[in-house]
Amino acid sequence: MAGQEYITYPNQVREKLHGKMILVIGSSKSGARKVWDIFTKAKLKVIMVAPKASNFGADKVDTCIYYDYYTEKSDMEKHADNIIELLGDRVRNIDGCFTFTEEDTPISATVCRKLQLRGFHPDAALTVRSKYKTYEALRSKINKTKYKTEEYSPVSYRIQSEEDIKEAKKIIYPAILKPEQDAGSWGVVKVISEEDCEQQYKRIQSIFSASSFGERFGKSMVLMELLEGPSYNVDLVIYDGELMAAFITDIGLYLPNMFNDTTTCIPSNLSAKLKDQLTTAAHHSCCKVGLLNGVFNTEFKMTQSGLKIVEINGRVGCYRRCIVYETVHGVNLWEIAATIACGIKPRFPDALPRCFAVGVYLFNKFHAKQFLKQDVHQKLRSMAEAKDILMAMRTETAEVDCEKEFAKPFCHLVVLDSTSIQRARQALIQLYKDLGFTEKEYNLERFTSMWV
């Protein structure tokens, strides 16, 4: 809406949000189970529609409606109509609708459109659910917009059979093979030749077929050029296509032959010029694919040939990163997602970071045995309670499907310093050693070496 009044965050925004009713489609993952307390603190009334009776938010919301919209996923229009019917007269009082789970973005966008609430088109949700469609959309010249994003799109092909690998003529090996949807770092592998790619494809398909999460990822994969260079997460607040705020996380070096994030640095250690380039690339990419209202997450690689997109997520980024943003920048992105959904246009006053945060992800393979020692665990708990560190835990610290094959972090451990990134890094390294984490395969000093 042209000329709409800006509402200053946080005080004015929170005053406006007070008492608003929001519809949340889907529950939270276990790692974000505390997000419901944020809505309670903001005095929001929450209706949740969840596909399963067992979920992490059912006892934290005002109303919980169970409806299976995962069956016959292709009929989003029918499911959206059914959800609206189940809501009954409550639809008149709903001020906003959104989701914070990737698989629920299409149904959430469809409900938003039918209720004429602020959000983005279902086509945009379907585009960013697929990494291949995302790359294609960024290259597309059919959808004429002012956003020039072709340069950010890597060379890529959709792989649904071994024959598709042979047809990927523009791929130069080594390359990356990864699931088309979701996955994080699961199922992401480096392939060194066409023959190796075929073998890895068959191996991963076999693993996913036998796992509980394979149904979610499906059989479709993406073969893409290998992107080498440092990685960055950019979390954006966008209102009617206008960039309201952006927050950057620097990601440390990867483990050899793995694609898991190992370490994080907030605020970014990049120069002002590079931060501007990264923010522009993220903003333009979101708008090009149709994400015009909401809080979104992007990941980029800074390669020798320029910035390249890894993925765009049509929802708020991971909880572990968001709580660090709140500590460093004083901005709660879950609260802002509700703000945008309710049609409130936030303004963020310029402010210096409150502190500097350098973090490490802990994995079962490298850290669980030492972490579970009583003295180590107790020390970390005490430090977290005293707010000397941030410690974001998952519930599934051991029984994780395919843990031996594709590692998943169980904790994000973050050290804070009031003066500099370098001092925060040194404090983290010292704490890591003091706790007895000496695994040679997980070299914290190397992973954080770009922040010296």
Image: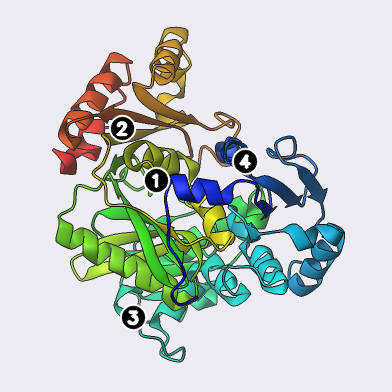
Task: In the rendered view, tell whether residue 415 sits above or below residue 191.
Answer: above
Q: Earlier in the sequence, mark 1 or mark 3?
A: 3
Find numbered disc 1 in the image and state the secondary structure of the residue it sits on.
loop
Q: Are marks 1 and 3 in contact (CB under 8 Å)?
A: no
Amino acid residing under circle 1: Asn
Amino acid residing under circle 4: Lys
Task: In the rendered view, tell whether residue 385 sits above or below residue 301.
Answer: above
Residue 334 visible, this orientation: no
Q: Which mark is residue 260?
A: 1
Q: Earlier in the sequence, mark 1 or mark 2?
A: 1
Q: Which residue is mark 4?
A: 43
Position of residue 338 measured from the top left corner of the image (x, y, whole percent): 56, 53
Task: In the rendered view, tell whether residue 33 sits above or below residue 132.
Answer: above
Q: Which residue is mark 2?
A: 442
Find numbered disc 2 in the image and state the secondary structure of the residue it sits on.
loop
Can you tell which of label 1 and label 3 is closer to the viewer?
3
Q: Residues within 10 Å of mark 1 (few under 14, many from 20)?
A: many
Q: Quadrant of residue 118?
A: bottom right
Find numbered disc 3 in the image and state the secondary structure of the residue it sits on.
helix
Q: Are marks 4 and 3 in contact (CB under 8 Å)?
A: no
Amino acid residing under circle 2: Tyr
